[in-house]
Amino acid sequence: MISFKLRGVTLRVEFSFLVFNALVFLFRDSTLILAFYTTCALHESGHILALGLTGGRLSSVSFGAAGIRMETVRTGAEPVMRSLFVLLAGPAVNILVFAAMKLIGCGGIFPVLNLCAAAYNMLPFRNLDGGAVIALFTVGTPHERTAELVLKVIRLIIIVFAALAFFELRLI
């Protein structure tokens, strides 16, 4: 792992991130690569903008194969609405970009990637925005165990449908 500080923010780049990027560059054309990284940058910029608007500060950013993880400077108990606003800002930016591109008649892969990024990040996995939103309302409550069980079932259903879709596409 490579780690360094930039303006008080610790930046970490994991080996898995470098491997992921190498694979992206091996298998896709330059237009798609640019669209992919622009979509990711817009998403993360949404989180950073919302964090700044609510008076928060970044403490670290970690780049890994599973995505980008940002941690904030903790000032005690964070208000739920502030955290919710920051978590939903990334997918909201992707949806706004998708809607704007469609409204002005732009097609291609870029608007679709933005819509896919928003949908992907709202999946109920803890490392994604959707899972973090659910955790805001369930962690530390009497319903935490029930929520975890429901989320496991939902994840299993998502995996089954994704596998079925993958195999269906392979048969075409």
Image (cartoon, grey):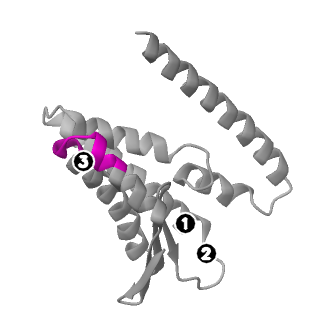
Does residue 21 appear in this view? yes
The C terminus: image quadrant? top left
- Residue at position x 32%, y 47% from top? 24
- Distance from label 2 to label 3 (Cα)? 36 Å
The span picked out in magenta is 23-32
The foreground one among 66 and 100 is: 66
Amino acid type, residue under disc 2 in the picture? Glu
Q: Mark 2 points at which residue?
A: 78
- How far apart in space, not on screen, are marks 2 and 1 (Cα)? 7 Å
Q: Considering depth in this image, is 1 or 63 the residue closer to the camera?
A: 1
**In the rendered structure, which amino acid carries the disc numbered 3?**
Ile
Q: Where is residue 141 in the image (x, y as percent from the top left)?
A: 81, 59
- Residues at marks 2 and 1 touching, judged by CB atoms closer than 8 Å: yes
Q: Is residue 16 above or below residue 104?
A: below
The correct choice, above or below, for 43 with respect to 164 in the image is below
* Outermost residue toward the bottom in this view: 8
Identify whether 3 is placed above or below 169: below
User: Which of the marked residues, 2 or 3, is nearer the chain's N terminus?
Assistant: 3
Question: In the figure, is residue 144 to the left or right of 161?
Answer: right
Magenta region, main secondary structure:
helix
Q: What element carries label 1?
A: helix
Label 3, residues with CA under 10 Å away: few <14, some 14-19, many ≥20: some
The residue at which mark 3 appears reads as: 33
